[in-house]
């Protein structure tokens, strides 16, 4: 068995890992690369995977950096099945269609800006269309958690709950070669314990090889319980000066978690009456998908549904879909909280909200998720004095607040605990770190080695490891 690490190697985007056995070739995830526009387009056009070689794709979850390139893979000739949980399949129906729509919309906007204003940007063409998305969705096969399924000659699949986002899965492959069965465990993105809405991550047994994400391998999150306090404090500070609060948020999971937190704070009387806008057609669709999959919820969230009290609704909350209503939010001088995609501020309506607000010091940007290098979100986290949007540099005067405790990724302590739990339940021979920047991976590797974890590697792009 050999694994080639095509994407999310020494970085956090573009997850793609090719598993090759004597009898089959399996692709784990097929995600978009996110970063500088020109580099992203080039990386996404050239997937680094031969579609004709693949017997199957296994998708860990629906986030675009894990699923977004699937339609491009199909466009380039892949005709096989894509295995994922039923919730991930349903989410991808909305998210991949939205990705195609955003590509078309951004291409129109940028190309008009070049033609009209001479903006300093390259012309853009969408990478794929709605038709490519429809062809991709036809190939999905839903696999519930804990249902063992043969997906290729000598390869069986079982999915475990990763606790990261709705439907997220830890992929377990049992690979038979030369009379021996090797168990490969791939975390995808690993969630945290005791988060609102979702269940805790599960620990598979019998692993020989663990491939684990390492996004926060060099840091610890603030306690989840402290996030409500930090969120309430920041919002009240912005409202006291009459400002708007922009929350760039992944449409999947993070937006729902922030809404859930605001519901708790309002219910406890810890926030003033206010307007909260969830301004993302995709988030509206995803929230509807959440309601279809209570099997993924923890006990508290399920209790709300049984009691017929929506976890995603409260007084003053408005879900916005049409463009005119979105534009009206920026035109109004009234304070408000605006939750909008995309989470790394690279596309979608949030960029327009940031354009309208960041040059005014009374406003605030609250960052609630990881921001990859070379993204607008990362530049906001770094509090650059000037940031570029749509080819124009703007002064960053708004207050920027970073709330890492909302992250759906395990931190260093949780990654170590998970790895040690896997080792205790199996015969772990090697550990491979993916989906992390070099500093995070080096720090995590040092901590794991100190605990006697065997054969740890952090492969570079295109590295191949034999197991």
Image (spheres, rainbow, N blue to C red):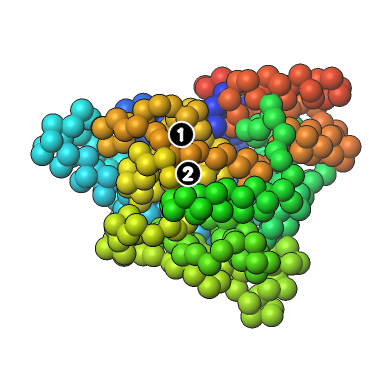
Asked if labels 1 and 2 touch by Cβ distance under 8 angstroms, the answer is yes
The total number of labels drawn is 2
Residue 255, how many percent across, how many down?
53, 55
Q: Residue at x 32, y 55 (%)?
A: 330
Rendered view: 413 above or below 368? above
Residue at image point 72% right, 25% down: 444
Q: Residue 75: name its quadrant.
A: top left
Mark 1 residue element: helix
Residue 26 visible = no
- Residue 163 image point, x, y percent: 69, 51
User: Residue tagged by mark 2?
Assistant: 365
Q: Residues within 10 Å of mark 2 (few under 14, many from 20)?
A: many
Q: Residues within 10 Å of mark 1 (few under 14, many from 20)?
A: many
Residue 228 in the image: x percent, y percent?
A: 67, 53
Eyeballing the image, is 133 above or below 446?
below
Q: Residue 347 versus residue 386: which sits nearer the camera?
A: 386
How far apart are labels 2 and 1 at the CA level? 8 Å
Can residue 91 be seen?
A: yes
| Residue at the outermost right position | 424
- Residue lying furthest left: 116
Residue behind mark 1:
380
């Amino acid at each position: 068995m050999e694994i080639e690490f095509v994407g999310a190697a020494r970085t956090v985007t573009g997850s793609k890992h090719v598993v090759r056995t004597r009898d089959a070739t399996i692709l784990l995830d097929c995600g978009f690369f996110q970063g500088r526009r020109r580099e992203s387009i080039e990386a996404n056009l050239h997937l680094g995977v031969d579609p004709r070689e693949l017997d199957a794709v296994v998708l860990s979850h629906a986030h675009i950096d894990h699923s977004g390139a699937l339609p491009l893979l199909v466009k380039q000739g892949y005709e096989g099945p894509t295995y994922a949980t039923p919730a991930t399949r349903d989410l991808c129906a909305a998210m991949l269609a939205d990705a195609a729509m955003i590509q078309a919309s951004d291409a129109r906007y940028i190309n008009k800006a070049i033609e009209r204003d001479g903006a300093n940007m390259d012309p853009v063409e969408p990478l794929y269309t709605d038709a490519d998305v429809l062809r991709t969705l036809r190939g999905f096969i839903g696999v519930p958690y804990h249902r063992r399924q043969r997906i290729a000659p000598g390869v069986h699949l079982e999915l475990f709950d990763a606790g990261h986002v709705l439907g997220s899965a830890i992929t377990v492959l049992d690979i038979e070669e030369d009379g021996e069965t090797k168990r490969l465990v791939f975390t995808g993105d690993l969630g945290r314990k005791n988060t609102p809405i979702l269940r805790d991550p599960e620990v598979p047994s019998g692993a020989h090889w663990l491939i684990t994400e390492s996004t926060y391998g060099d840091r610890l999150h603030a306690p989840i319980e402290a996030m409500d306090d930090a969120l309430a404090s920041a919002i009240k500070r912005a409202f006291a000066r009459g400002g708007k609060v922009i929350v760039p948020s992944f449409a999947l999971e993070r937006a729902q978690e922030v809404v859930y937190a605001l519901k708790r704070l309002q219910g406890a009387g810890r926030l003033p009456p206010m307007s909260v806008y969830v301004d993302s057609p995709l988030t509206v669709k995803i929230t509807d998908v959440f309601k279809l999959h209570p099997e993924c919820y923890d006990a508290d969230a399920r209790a709300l549904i049984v009691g017929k009290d929506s976890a995603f609704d409260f007084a003053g909350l408005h879900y916005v879909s049409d463009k005119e209503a979105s534009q009206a939010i920026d035109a109004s001088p009234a304070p408000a909280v605006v939750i909008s995609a995309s989470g790394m501020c690279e596309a979608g309506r949030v960029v327009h909200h940031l354009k309208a607000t960041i040059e005014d010091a009374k406003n605030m940007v609250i960052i609630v998720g990881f921001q990859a290098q070379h993204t607008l979100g990362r530049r906001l986290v770094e509090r650059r004095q000037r940031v570029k949007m749509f080819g124009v540099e703007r002064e960053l005067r708004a207050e920027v607040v970073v709330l890492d405790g909302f992250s759906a990724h395990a931190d260093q302590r949780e990654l170590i605990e998970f790895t040690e739990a896997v080792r205790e339940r199996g015969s772990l021979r090697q550990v491979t770190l993916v989906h992390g920047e070099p500093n995070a991976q080096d720090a995590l590797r040092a901590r794991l080695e100190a605990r006697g974890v065997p054969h740890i590697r952090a492969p570079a792009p295109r590295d191949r490891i034999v197991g």
